[in-house]
Amino acid sequence: MKFDLQASFTFSGDITAIKKEIERCVSTLNENVLKKDDDHKAKIERAAIEGNKLCLSIYSEGVFRPHNALLQIKNFFVKELGLKHHVGVRGVTVDHYSIVFDLEKEPLHPVSIPFAEVKTQGKQVTMSLSEVSDEFLQKNYIDRMINRLKEKVENQYYEGKAEFWKLIWESDEIKPVWSSDPTEEMVKLDWLKQGPTKGKWFYRPQAAAVLKTMEKIAIEEVLKPLGFQEVIESHIKPFDIWLKTGHMEGMPGEFYYVVEPKTRDPKDWEHFVDLTKITKEVNIAELTKNLSPPSAGICYAQCPMIYWSFKGKTIAERSLPVLVYDKTAVSCRYESGGRHGIERVDEFHRIEPVYIGTREQLLILREKLLERYKFVFNDIFELEWRMAWVTPWYMQQAGKFGESKEQDTGTIDFEAYMPYRGTRKDSEWLEFQNLSILGDKYIQAFTIKAQKSELWSGCSGIGLERWAIAFLAQKGLNPEHWPKGFRKYLDKLPEGIQFL
Ligand code: SER
Ligand code: ZN
């Protein structure tokens, strides 16, 4: 990498007369202060004096970034010139900063980035910044800009490519009871009602009973036997949690945002109330005047807030592994084109178990969870399903692709055959659950500690709609055709309500 920085130092007085002294300082800076070793050096390549101004060109190719040298240069001038020549440094400004680096691959399309003009030639990138503030330099924006640019080019190569997917296990083929789309049939039977807004559903007693049975089975057959304890979290996630987990940069286009009223003083709302009473309509422009900008969003996944609840805590060894789950927060994801039935929705119900413990504890837990899940899907649901390693969800949710580097960490997807979609081979199977071990990613992000142990964490998403649709798509809507194991939990559906 090549860094070329043009900075001007403004002194308290004219420095033309002490040109020699300045030149001596520049030599000393180059020989000592800016040269720690061969890899770790920057060089002032040019120094020009204009009255009380000293303009420097600082160049480096190594890990020592010129902008990190500015403070040292300033301090050096203060020390050397202050006592002897009674001049101080009033200010330092960066006039221009150009950074040249090589990418691994040539960009496929032009790339841009905030705060800089970007030019590429083959694999070489030149990032030019002008009028850079101190704050900008101190906040490490430069490194993040370089990383972001590299990431954007890398992503260009993934666009449109199939995601990583590696089969782990598959069940035997099981003859489905039918091949209809369960949602459509449930709507016809009035078990379900679509809406009231996009991608949301109203579950009437029969469909609600199926979802609640899924919840019960997950708790009784998977979570309780393994010692998971229930927690209840808030639905509303402030942005700082998503900044830490990476969701904020990963999927800002998929959140349902939450806004608070600016005020609850009836006087401030009087006009809006008058309008509503008179027009019987919602005057959005008037309403917006009384709303704050968004500062949070509705739950997207439950684990981020569970990690947040452990933020800065030291967990006692005896509490490891921590095994908790939330089944209260309802998740919302803004789907654009992909909505379908109750399996691809904007609002869904999920139980999310989260586990925190040592690497060994979590690897053992993964085996136990897999064993319990297999019992549910094979012996209770009698499903045709399979498991595959996929791109870890946190990478997907941070807009990244590919597989996790280590074997111990990563995400397993559970997929079920959907007879209504076509043949086993050619149709898309439904991802109805996932299970992940994520190493220390969130442990670090939320500074979670143990007395002695190094912690890892992971989570598993048990989507109730997904469980229900995987089951119903293969087993139909008639309880008489349902497997015995399932009928132990739900033998008869509620009567529901008859409509005329
Ligand atoms: N957090 C995981 C996900 O978002 C599991 O729910 O998929
Ligand atoms: Zn999670």
Image (cartoon, grey):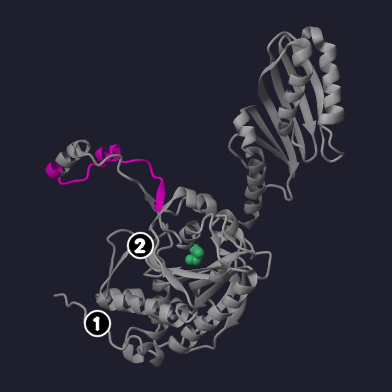
* Range drawn in magenta: 277-297
| Residue 25 x/y as whole percent | 83, 20
| Sequence-wise first label, 1 or 2 | 2
Give me the C-alpha separation between circle 1 and circle 2: 25 Å
From the viewer's perspective, is 338 left or right of 161?
left
Quadrant of image for the C terminus:
bottom left
Tell me which amino acid carries mark 1.
Answer: Pro
Q: Which residue is mark 2?
A: 199
Which secondary structure lies at badge 2? loop
In percent of the image, x 12 and y 42: which residue is there? 278
Question: From the viewer's perspective, is residue 392 above or below residue 481?
Answer: above
Number of marks present in the image shown: 2
Residue 91, quarter of the rendered image:
top right
Residue plotted at (47% across, 80% down): 222
Q: Which mark is residue 159?
A: none
Give the residue at x 57% y 54%: 445
Mark 1, residue position: 494
Q: Residue at x 40, y 63 (%)?
A: 339
Amino acid bearing label 2: Gly
